[in-house]
């Protein structure tokens, strides 16, 4: 998984795997789900990220057992 924040465009993107993106659907305003050729979600993008979260440059990662 890769997480990237582009401050110049204010987009936070999360890529779940290296599968090529074939398209995207805006599920909610400012939330785009990227999908592969078969329609599987392979990533997501949050537009205007700095307005949607406290600090898009900060990431907390946890794994539940």
Image: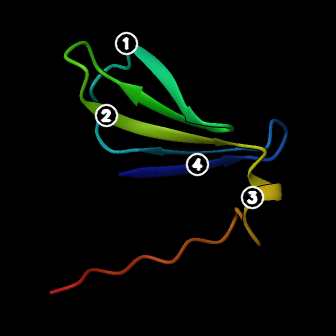
Q: Is residue 52 above or below residue 28?
A: below
Judged from the image, the secondary structure of the residue bearing numbered disc 2 is strand
Q: Is residue 35 left or right of residue 38?
A: right
Q: Quadrant of residue 21?
A: top left
- Residue 26 is situated, as x and y percent measured from the top left of the image, at 56, 28
Rendered residue at 80%/57% (across/down): 50
- Among numbered discs 1 and 3, the one appearing first in the sequence: 1
Residue denoted by label 2: 41
- Mark 3: give few (<14), some (14-19) or many (20+) Cα within 10 Å: few
Tell me the CA gap for discs 2 and 3.
21 Å
Q: Is residue 27 left or right of residue 47?
A: left
Judged from the image, the secondary structure of the residue bearing numbered disc 1 is loop
Of marks 4 and 2, the one in the foreground: 2
- Among numbered discs 2 and 1, the one appearing first in the sequence: 1
Which disc is residue 4 wearing? 4
- Among numbered discs 4 and 1, the one appearing first in the sequence: 4
Tell me the CA gap for discs 1 and 3.
26 Å
Task: Out of 17 and 37, give the one closest to the viewer.
Answer: 37
- Among numbered discs 3 and 4, the one appearing first in the sequence: 4
Which disc is residue 22 wearing? 1
Task: Out of 19 and 37, give the one closest to the viewer.
Answer: 37
Of marks 3 and 4, the one in the foreground: 3
- Residue 13 is situated, as x and y percent measured from the top left of the image, at 56, 43
Residue closest to the far bottom: 65
Residue denoted by label 3: 52
């Amino acid at each position: 998984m890769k997480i990237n924040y582009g401050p110049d465009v204010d987009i936070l993107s999360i890529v779940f795997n290296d599968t090529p993106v074939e398209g995207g659907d805006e599920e909610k305003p400012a939330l785009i789900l990227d999908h592969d050729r078969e329609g599987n979600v392979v990533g997501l993008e949050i537009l205007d990220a700095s307005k949607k979260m406290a600090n898009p440059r900060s990431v907390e990662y946890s794994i539940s057992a």
